[in-house]
């Protein structure tokens, strides 16, 4: 966050469609909820994310 690596427990939900795209909502403890669109790639071993909240530019990936 703002150039720092921040760790915090979080809760969240996600919905994935048959075409491997979906949406997710994560709420880190003490922060506002974060909303994402994602796509699952690489035979399910990687997720590409793009935050959809107003005034944000956040993209990333998760790997198994």
Image (cartoon, grey):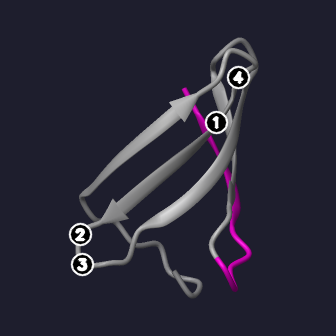
Q: Residues within 10 Å of mark 4 (few under 14, many from 20)?
A: few
User: Residue 15: percent from the left, percent from the top?
Assistant: 52, 33
Please give the label number shown on residue 20.
4
Q: Secondary structure at mark 3?
A: loop
Q: Residues within 10 Å of mark 2 (few under 14, many from 20)?
A: few
Q: CA distance from mark 4 to mark 2?
A: 28 Å
Q: Mark 3 or mark 1: which is in front?
A: 1
Above or below 53: residue 25: above
Disc 2 target residue:
29
**Closest to the observer, 1 or 21:** 21
Disc 1 target residue:
22
Residue depicted at x 24% and y 78%: 30
Q: CA distance from mark 1 to mark 2?
A: 23 Å
Upstream in sequence: badge 1 or badge 2: 1
Residue contact at pointers 3 and 4, CB within 8 angstroms: no
Residue contact at pointers 2 and 3, CB within 8 angstroms: yes
């Amino acid at each position: 966050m703002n150039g720092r690596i921040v760790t915090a427990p979080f809760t969240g939900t996600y919905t994935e469609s048959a075409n491997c795209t979906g949406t997710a909502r994560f709420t880190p403890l003490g922060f506002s909820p974060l909303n994402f669109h994602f796509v699952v790639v690489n035979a399910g071993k990687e997720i590409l994310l793009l935050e959809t909240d107003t005034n944000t530019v956040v993209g990333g990936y998760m790997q198994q």
